[in-house]
Amino acid sequence: MEKVTGLNYLEYQSLLKPLIDVIPLITFILAPDGRFYLMNRAAYEAIIESGNEPYDYHGKSGGEVFGCIHAHDDPLGCTFGPACNDCELFVLALSALKGKTAAKAPCKFYYQDRSGTKTLSLLISAGPLTILGETYAVVVIEDVSEKEKLEAELLKKMKLEALGTLAGGIAHDFNNSLMAILANIQLALLKLDKGADIKKHLLDSVEMIYNTSNLAKQLLTFSSGGAPVKTFTSITNLIKDNVNFVLQGSKIKCRFIIAPNLRPVEIDPGQISQVINNLVINAMQAMPDGGFINVIAKNVDLNSDGNYRPGRYVMIAIQDYGRGIPKENLPKIFDPFFTTKPEGTGLGLATSYSIIKKHDGYLEVDSHEGAGSLFTIYLPAALNGRTPSDNEDYPCGFPAGDTVKGPRVLVMDDEEILRNLVGEILSGFSYRITAVKDGHEAIKAYRLAKERGAPYAAVIMDDLIPGSMGGQEAIIYLRAIDPDVKAIVAGDSAKNRLLKHYRKYGFRGALLKPYRFDELYGLLHKVIDDNC
């Protein structure tokens, strides 16, 4: 390129070079053919720092000069393949050469120097420059790699501070729960000596322990393993029970507008209860002086409009008439750690959003400052499975029955105290229990019972047994003995895929520890009756 528009290269260089040298960012001008025409001092120094030779850049491609790993002998040193089409440096420069309006965009730039392949985070600006009728491109590059690192460190620090606040809150809640449990047990012991009724204190202790376990489950929701352990559920009672529980003792009244015959859903009842609790608490905090909230539930059919997967859903909406959410905060309310409350951790709505997403549903908000908020949940309706009764429930006490003639159940757990307690409770529910400590003993007991013509109606197995065979392995052998084995798996962490996908492994049901014995009895009853 000896001549450009009638003037030689040196004449244009002497005219433009002083202008671009005062720019502190990497700046260069590309000729109409996409090759280097001129660069400033900052660009020159950047090339030297990368280990390349800048003295003969004139007429070369960008890839040749900067060492782009995709460089070929093409304009801009690009291959015009998929890698280049995704490169904002290439796209913006090409756009400028075509005379389009100046634009700016972030870019990841991969280049090769003496030490190997490097990656930079860049902010690219490019615009056209007309010189005597021909279109050149002026490209300005800002290296924001260090800025991104600092922002990442700042975000990490903010998250750690938020986690510190969260940890303090959890410790406070745990201590309160432990205090309540300890007080109930101590009162029960005192009353026991006097022959007084202690049932209420024991039931209160059970309830406190169950509620305390939800704190750990909330934290698991943010991990990759916070997967829902789904069961077929009728949503009506779950909605009413949780809303009434949260509102008890408050100045808020609830109007339920729930359609009859809601479709059954396949959900994790504990996690969806947590979502409803979070949304109701949010509504309460928006109306500190009291008032009404509306809780609406109905069947809806969503069509494909780009925002939803088409199908049948159950919609749950919680509406308050509080202070509303400022417009500038709406895009951020589901972000983890975002909160406008001094004592908040920013986990409530973020947890709820994560839970609904893991249920393949949607959580939306419509709010206007000073006019209240409407949170809407869409849960996919169950495609199969029996429809649970809204009135279905199982007692916490022991039903009367013949403990000799009840169904036989095999219980496997490595903790002797736990398997004995489970056995004692289920014996009270008329089941005949055999307790074993690992998978080897479970296989032996199951085979022997079947050979003797007295098979087990169901098996309850711990998912993992340290140092021995757990339920995940034992179920393979049990299904070989009996393809129709009715087995339930129990585990203490939802991050185990076995609990989420228990049917794929051959189980009929799953329990997340700690569980209530009425949950155990209810699931066992369904499994034995072939309702799971």
Image: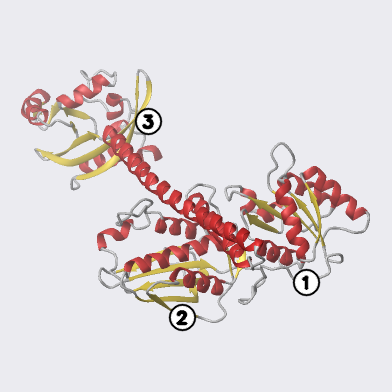
Callout in the foreground (3, 1): 1
Residue 27 position (above or below residue 228): above
Q: In screen coordinates, is 60 left or right of 400?
A: left
The residue tagged 1 is 400
Query: What distance separates the C-alpha of mark 3 from that of mark 1?
Result: 77 Å
Residue 10 got which mark?
Answer: none
**Of the image marks 3 and 1, the number of the one nearer the N terminus:** 3
Q: Quadrant of the N terminus?
A: top left
Mark 2 belongs to which amino acid?
Ile
Q: CA distance from mark 2 to mark 1?
A: 38 Å
**Amino acid type for the residue under numbered disc 3:** His
The relative height of residue 56 versus residue 96 in the rendered view (above or below) is above
Percent across and percent down for residue 228 are: 56, 56
**Residue 136 picture quarter:** top left
- Tell me which amino acid carries mark 1: Ala
Mark on residue 70? 3
Q: Position of residue 76 (x, y in %)?
A: 28, 32
Could you tell me which residue is drawn at 42 percent across and 46 percent down?
167
- Residue 97, located in which quarter of the rendered image? top left
In the foreground, 253 or 496:
253
Q: Earlier in the sequence, mark 2 or mark 1?
A: 2
Where is residue 248 drawn, in percent x and y? 45, 72
